[in-house]
């Protein structure tokens, strides 16, 4: 089953890091990534752009596009990983590994299903 691990952090802290500090953190995260990649369970991972450039679409009909993510949190969603894990416990273990590399971040773990236009995927046993 696929799990999304969403990485939250206070954006002003992340953007205050020097290029060397950012590179050091990314090197630590690459070690965590490598352990999962070696198992063949790491899917795409992305680092999101600045929240100041984010937009939100909400409302009825065509909706209205608003500036910003409008999160009611101190942290912002700054990136995400897709892991192919057999169960929730394995996904939590993967998030803990990321957290050891970046202990000031918050990681949300959610099961996900692939949504492909024109195709229907059968739910896994865990989703039934």
Image: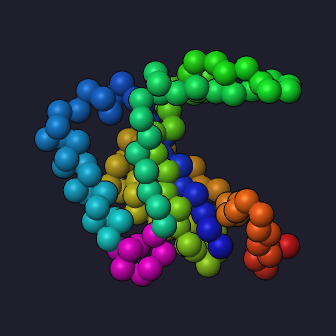
The answer to which image quadrant residue 86 occupies is bottom right
Q: Residue 106 at what x, y percent from top left? A: 48, 44
Q: Is residue 1 visible?
A: yes
10 vs 66, left or right, is left
Q: Is residue 36 magenta?
A: yes
32 and 58: which is toward the camera: 58
Q: Is residue 20 above or below residue 50?
A: below
Q: Is residue 78 above or below residue 3?
A: above
Q: Residue furthest left?
A: 20
- In the rendered structure, which segment of residues is drawn in magenta? 35-42
62 and 56: which is toward the camera: 62
Q: Residue 92 at what x, y percent from top left? A: 55, 64
113 vs 16, left or right, is right
Identity of the residue drawn at 34% across and 49% down: 102
Q: Is residue 76 above or below residue 48?
A: above
Q: Which secondary structure type mostly characterizes the magenta part of the structure?
A: helix
The answer to which image quadrant residue 97 occupies is bottom left
Identity of the residue drawn at 80% across and 75% down: 122
Q: Residue furthest front?
A: 118
46 and 15: which is toward the camera: 46
Q: Is residue 72 visible?
A: no
Quadrant placement of the C terminus: bottom right
Count of labels in the image: 0
Q: Residue 107 at what x, y percent from top left? A: 51, 49
The answer to which image quadrant residue 21 occupies is top left
Identity of the residue drawn at 76% across and 68% down: 119
Identity of the residue drawn at 53% across and 67% down: 83
């Amino acid at each position: 089953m696929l799990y999304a691990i969403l990485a939250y952090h206070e954006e002003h802290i992340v953007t205050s890091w020097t290029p060397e500090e950012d590179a050091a953190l990314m090197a630590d995260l690459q070690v965590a990534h490598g352990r999962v990649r070696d198992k063949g369970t790491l899917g795409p991972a992305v680092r999101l752009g600045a929240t100041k450039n984010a937009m939100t679409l909400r409302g009825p009909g065509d909706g209205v596009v608003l500036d910003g993510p409008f999160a009611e949190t101190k942290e912002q969603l700054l990136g995400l990983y897709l892991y192919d894990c057999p169960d929730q416990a394995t996904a939590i273990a993967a998030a803990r590994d990321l957290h050891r590399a970046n202990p000031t971040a918050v990681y949300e773990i959610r099961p996900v299903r692939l949504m492909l236009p024109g195709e229907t995927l059968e739910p896994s046993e865990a989703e039934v």
